[in-house]
Image: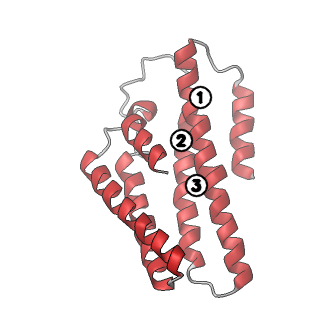
């Protein structure tokens, strides 16, 4: 995720036409997030549940702060209103970050459950949200922005873009 977070912190405001990223918050996030990952690995190796609980809380909390510091859900500033281009990539990126926030919520919710079946189900749901919801949506959203810019072509079909968006979100 660090690669995605790093690219997002540098490009998200220009891709979504939102206010500039809050650099100070992003820097603090990276330090705390990476230190939390060390704790997460230690908890996985030692199977100490309390360390896992604390590191998952830190990761979730500071990832939500990171999402807010990116300004993903803020209103457009309007700097690109005069530029004629397809803007459908924006919803893929925004919904991708929404899936990340939802998946972190599911991961935290699994800490409250003691039932092995429920734990397994919630872990699968969180992992599905991370991979299909967050990573895939961001890959498609960024590709839909960069490839037309680099090649000078337009998106081939708005209808297929809509189908892709809804099918990814359904399942």
Q: What whole-number distance in Å separates the C-alpha atoms at marks 3 and 2?
A: 10 Å
Residue nearest the observer in this picture, 54 or 18: 54
Q: What whole-number distance in Å separates the C-alpha atoms at marks 2 and 1?
A: 10 Å
Which of the two discs, 3 and 2, labels the residue nearer the N terminus?
Answer: 2
Q: Residues within 10 Å of mark 1 (few under 14, many from 20)?
A: many
Q: Which residue is mark 1?
A: 144
Residue 61, x across and y down, in percent: 41, 66
Left/right placement of residue 39 relative to residue 134 reads: left
Residue 110, x across and y down, in percent: 60, 77
Left/right placement of residue 95 relative to residue 57 reads: right
Q: Residues within 10 Å of mark 2 (few under 14, many from 20)?
A: many
* Kind of element beneath mark 2: helix
Residue nearest the observer in this picture, 139 or 48: 48
Which residue does the image show at 57% across and 19% down from the upper left? Answer: 148
Which of the two discs, 2 and 1, labels the residue nearer the N terminus?
Answer: 2
Q: What whole-number distance in Å separates the C-alpha atoms at marks 3 and 1?
A: 19 Å
- In the image, residue 129 above or below residue 81: below
- In the image, residue 123 above or below residue 133: below
Q: Which residue is mark 3?
A: 99
Q: Which residue is mark 2?
A: 93
């Amino acid at each position: 995720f660090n690669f995605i977070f790093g690219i997002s912190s540098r490009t998200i405001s220009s891709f979504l036409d939102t206010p500039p990223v809050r650099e100070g918050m992003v820097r603090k996030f990276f330090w705390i997030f990476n230190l939390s990952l060390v704790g997460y690995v230690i908890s996985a190796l030692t199977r100490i549940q309390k360390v896992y609980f604390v590191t998952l809380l830190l990761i979730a909390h500071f990832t939500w702060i990171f999402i807010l510091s990116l300004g993903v859900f803020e209103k457009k500033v309007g700097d690109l209103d005069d530029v004629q281009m397809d803007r459908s990539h924006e919803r893929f990126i925004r919904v991708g970050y929404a899936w990340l926030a939802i998946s972190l919520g599911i991961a935290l919710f699994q800490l409250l459950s003691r039932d092995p079946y429920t734990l397994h189900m919630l872990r699968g749901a969180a992992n599905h949200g991370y991979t299909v919801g967050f990573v895939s949506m961001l890959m498609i959203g960024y590709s839909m922005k960069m490839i037309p810019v680099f090649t000078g072509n337009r998106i081939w079909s708005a209808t297929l873009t809509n189908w892709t968006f809804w099918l990814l979100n359904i399942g």
